[in-house]
Image: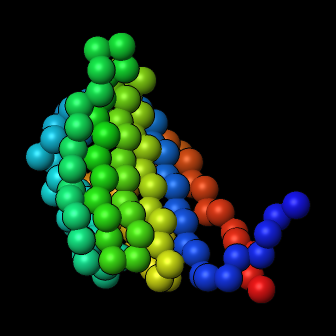
Amino acid sequence: MINKTPTKRYHLILDFIKVDKKYLNDKNFLERLIISVSKVIKMNILYGPVVIEGGKHNPGLSAFCIIDYSHISVHTFSKEREFCFDVFSCKKFDGVKLEKHLTKTLKASQNKVFIIRPKYERK
């Protein structure tokens, strides 16, 4: 059974495949990307961005920040050349604009991105 949510929630997940490895292993790039995303969605960063290197058994980077309405996170997987992005917010944001920003920044083609937009039932 799905409980009805009392607050508004907006969630966008973008998974990119066959991404250039230069974007997957660059801590400075991920920091700058998260900062640019916060500006695109018009939200303030309260903490971060934090970028952490994965283990040898799972190479890549994880990055996140806390924004005034929730979070932005990224996980990269070097071997598989995958870039997984997530933004969750209680404030509405322009997901189409964000998708275009990320696709352009990563120089990705549309057929190499998988988009998930969860829908939350409202009271």
Asked if residue 94 lies left or right of residue 27, the reply is right
Asked if residue 8 lies left or right of residue 59, the reply is right
- Asked whether the viewer can see residue 99, the reply is no
Along the viewing direction, whichever of 108 and 5 lies nearer the viewer: 5
Vertical order, 59 against 115 (above or below): above
Along the viewing direction, whichever of 98 and 8 lies nearer the viewer: 8
Which quadrant of the rendered structure holds the C terminus? Answer: bottom right
The x and y percentages for residue 60 are: 30, 29
- Asked whether the viewer can see residue 48, the reply is yes
The x and y percentages for residue 4 are: 77, 75
Number of marks: 0
Name of the residue lying farthest toward the top: 57
Asked if residue 56 lies left or right of residue 85, the reply is left
The x and y percentages for residue 36 are: 22, 66
Vertical order, 13 against 4 (above or below): above
Along the viewing direction, whichever of 30 and 72 lies nearer the viewer: 72
Instruction: Name the residue rendered at 17%, 53% in the picture.
Output: 31
Vertical order, 74 against 35 (above or below): above
Scheme by which the image is coloured: rainbow
Which quadrant of the rendered structure holds the N terminus? Answer: bottom right
Instruction: Name the residue rendered at 48%, 66% in the picture.
Output: 88
Instruction: Name the residue rendered at 70%, 71% in the picture.
Output: 120
